[in-house]
Amino acid sequence: MKRIKPVPNNNGSPRATLVEDMLDARRALLDAVTAMTAAAPHGRDYQHGGDYPGDWAEARMRIAQAQELADAYYQDAIELQGE
């Protein structure tokens, strides 16, 4: 797995809290896109490009970044437990 630098913790929150917040944001983005697709008129599909490919590409990128940071955090936590 590619190692990435974690998000700087400038407010003193525990790392686990920051990761939980990132995962909550990821879930919210996914829920928003799903709701937009379900309510879209004329068969717009926000999840697969549809009428707004740029918007979905941006959401998909942010979702992937949040997941990548969470994965890196959990990998670090596993390695620290083994030491």
Image: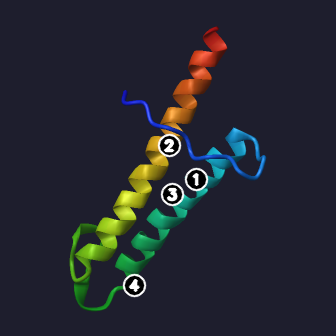
- Compare marks 4 and 1 and give the one earlier in the sequence: 1
| Location of residue 55 in the rendering, given as x and y in whole percent from the top left corner | 33, 75
Sequence-earlier tag: 4 or 3? 3
| SS at mark 2 in the image | helix
Distance from the alpha carbon under mark 1 to that under mark 3: 6 Å
Q: Which residue is mark 1?
A: 22
Q: Along the line of sight, which residue is nearer the eye, 76 or 33? A: 76
Number of residues whose C-alpha sits closer than 10 Å to that of mark 1, classed few (under 14), some (14–19) or many (20 or more): some
Q: Residue 69 — which label?
A: 2
Residue with the most extreme top position = 83
Q: Residue at x 64, y 54 (%)?
A: 21
Q: In front of the other: label 3 or label 2?
A: 2
Cα distance, mark 4 to mark 3?
Answer: 20 Å
Q: Earlier in the sequence, mark 3 or mark 2?
A: 3
Mark 1: secondary structure: helix
Label drawn at residue 45: none
- Secondary structure of the residue carrying tag 3 is helix
Q: Which residue is mark 4?
A: 39
Q: Nearer the viewer, residue 50 or 61?
A: 61
Left or right of residue 83, residue 28 in this image: left
Residue 35 appears left or right of 19: left
Q: Report if the CB atoms under discs 1 and 2 are less than 8 Å apart.
A: yes
Residue where numbered disc 3 is placed: 26
In contact (CB < 8 Å): disc 1 and disc 3: yes
Q: Residue at x 39, y 84 (%)?
A: 39
Q: Position of residue 50 (x, y in %)?
A: 21, 77
Asked if disc 4 and disc 2 are in contact, CB closer than 8 Å, the reply is no
Cα distance between the residues tagged 1 and 2: 8 Å
Q: Amino acid at mark 2?
A: Leu
